[in-house]
Image (cartoon, grey):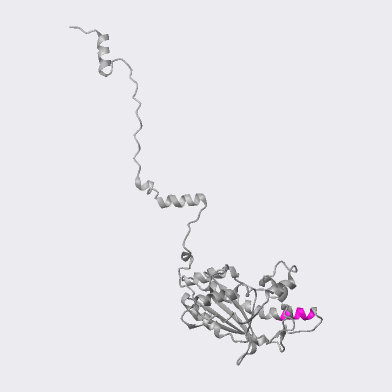
Amino acid sequence: MSINPDKLRALRRQAGGQVRGTPTRPAVTAAAPRAVDAAAAGPAPTRNTSIESLRRLLGVRERKPAYMNYPTGPIDRALPGEEIAPGLRMIQSHVAFPAPATTLALDFAKRHGEAVDPRELLFFDTETTGLAGGTGTRAFQIGAADWHHDPVHGDGLRIRQLLITTLAAEPLMLQTFTDWLGPNTVLSSYNGRCYDAPLLKTRYRLARMDDPITGLDHVDLLFPTRRRYRGVWENCRLATIERELLGIVREDDLPGSEAPAAWLSYLRGGPSSLLRRVCAHNHQDVVTLARLILRLVDAEAEAAGEVFTAS
């Protein structure tokens, strides 16, 4: 039996076979993926690498706790002075600055006809954990200066500074400051009537201790300084008065606004370098007060046509 060739080709097409004599086109297939050598390609990027790349793109640096910024080697924790009680240090020094030979007229403070024995003056300043005041703010350092005869150094300005390195030592600091005050002590400060004295009174009250400040005379040098020099310079900050009136230029001074952070850093185990600068700042503050009161007495005498050369 013979089969028609055309019908045979049709049957082969239906069966999917190749028809003889008919050119075939190669089938188009997807290229098989090439095997990648894992060793040559390297490890797949990790999540940390991606985060670091994003930070680099965004220019954002990773935030680290403050303690991670401390040096990895031994930390310098040395502080000046001596520890007179657990957590309480006293720094004492002497400046060759003899007391005036006469009493100081308080006319510059609008207390006409009154005068003070310079040896009864106690110039004081505090370094605190904040500038807002209130019960949440405490003094971690009290500095005081008075004219005193030292058996070794002779007459001059005695500077005593109390510094607490633990919170528990605050009552000891307050009691020591009380011991420095007598019934005839005349306090002198720069804005201490509005800030330092009220703050200390609050700390005495919270410690359930007698307040030794309220009954004492207090000569605040800020107000007479403002009356005389307001408008002469850009402001009456103590640093400005030092520079413009007393010719004192501080070197490597730590601003008072940075003192709280320096103390807290030390309490948390940080180095003592910044806290030592706080102590130096406080030392200069109380020395400046002694020089300033003499300059104000001079200025008042000059305005009245008198002569006074205590400064």
Residue 272, compared with residue 55, is above or below; it is: below
Q: Is residue 309 left or right of residue 38?
A: right
Quadrant that contains the N terminus:
top left
The front one of 72 and 235 is 235
Residue 34, above or below 203:
above
Q: Is residue 79 above or below residue 43?
A: below
Residue 307 spot, x, y in % from top left: 79, 84
Query: Where is residue 246 drawn, in percent x and y?
Result: 71, 76
> Quadrant of the image for the C terminus?
bottom right
- 233, above or below 164, in the image: above
Determine the residue located farthest toward the left in the rendered image: 1
Instruction: Tell me if residue 300 can be seen.
Output: yes
Between 42 and 56, the residue placed more toward the observer is 56
Taking the magenta stretch, the answer to whether it contains residue 131 is no
Q: Residue furthest right?
A: 305
The residue that appears at 73% across and 72% down in the rendered structure is: 227
Q: Where does the magenta region start and end?
A: 294-302
Main secondary structure found in the magenta portion: helix
- Left or right of residue 273, residue 122 in this image: right
The single residue placed furthest to the bottom in the displayed view is: 151
Does the stretch in magenta take in 297? yes
Is residue 277 in view? no
Number of callouts in the render? Answer: 0
At x 21%, y 8%, the residue is: 3
Q: Nearer the viewer, residue 40 or 162?
A: 162
The image quadrant of residue 220 is bottom right
